[in-house]
């Protein structure tokens, strides 16, 4: 799951929708669901790509990085990540993830920092 979490986190740093989609295809199941306190449940890679591209528009220059080694067992995973916002600093968040037999994420609940 470490490689999956790294690929997923790095996908948020890609610049075009096509690049994000290719990166997500490596780490997310087609039926992925995502939710955080600011985002109602979204389903599918295309909806997720739209979210990433929207975040680029709202926070230009922001970057993400994996902070901790993922802890995982029986389809459940948890890790910390950071978002660096130029001129504002670095903020920490966490994800709870469910994954399938191919180690692709099927559900992500994001615990995002208050910016």
Image (cartoon, helix red, strand yellow):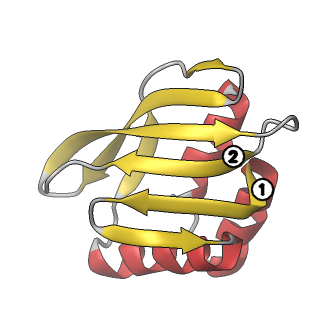
The residue lying furthest to the right in this view is: 102
Sequence-wise, the earlier of marks 2 and 1 is 1
Q: Position of residue 91 (x, y in %)?
A: 22, 42
Residue that appears at 44% across and 40% down: 95
Residue 72 percent across, percent down from the top left:
61, 20
Assign a secondary structure to mark 1: strand
Q: Quadrant of residue 70?
A: top right
Between 53 and 73, the residue placed more toward the observer is 73
Q: Nearer the viewer, residue 110 or 11?
A: 110
Q: Residues within 10 Å of mark 2 (few under 14, many from 20)?
A: many
Number of marks drawn: 2
Relative to 13, residue 56 above or below: below
* Residue displayed at 53% across by 18% down: 69
Assess whether mark 1 and mark 2 are in contact (beta carbons under 8 angstroms): yes
Q: Secondary structure at mark 2?
A: strand
Q: CA distance from mark 2 to mark 1?
A: 6 Å
Percent of width and height locating residue 35: 43, 60
Judge left or right: residue 22 versus residue 51: right
* Position of residue 30 in the picture relative to residue 77 (left or right): right
Residue occupying image coordinates x 59% and y 61%: 33
Q: Residues within 10 Å of mark 1 (few under 14, many from 20)?
A: some
Could you tell me which quadrant the N terminus lies in? top right
In the rendered image, which quarter is residue 57 located in?
A: bottom left
Q: Along the line of sight, which residue is nearer the eye, 78 or 27?
A: 78
Q: Is residue 39 above or below residue 50?
A: above
Please identify the quadrant where the C terminus is shown. Answer: bottom left
Residue 21 figure quarter: bottom right
Direction from residue 46 to residue 95 in the image, left or right: left
Residue for point 39% across, 54% down: 63
- Relative to 54, residue 76 above or below: above
Q: Which residue is mark 1?
A: 29
Q: Which residue is mark 2?
A: 105
């Amino acid at each position: 799951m470490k490689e999956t979490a790294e690929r997923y986190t790095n996908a948020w740093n890609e610049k075009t929708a096509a690049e994000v989609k290719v990166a997500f295809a490596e780490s997310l199941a087609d039926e992925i669901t995502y939710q955080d306190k600011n985002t109602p449940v979204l389903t599918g890679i295309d909806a997720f790509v739209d979210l990433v591209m929207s975040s680029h528009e709202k926070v230009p220059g922001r970057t993400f990085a994996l902070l901790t080694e993922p802890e995982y067992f029986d389809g459940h995973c948890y890790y910390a990540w950071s978002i660096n916002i130029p001129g504002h600093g670095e903020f920490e968040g966490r994800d709870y993830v469910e994954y399938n037999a191919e180690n692709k994420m099927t559900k992500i609940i994001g615990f995002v920092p208050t910016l």
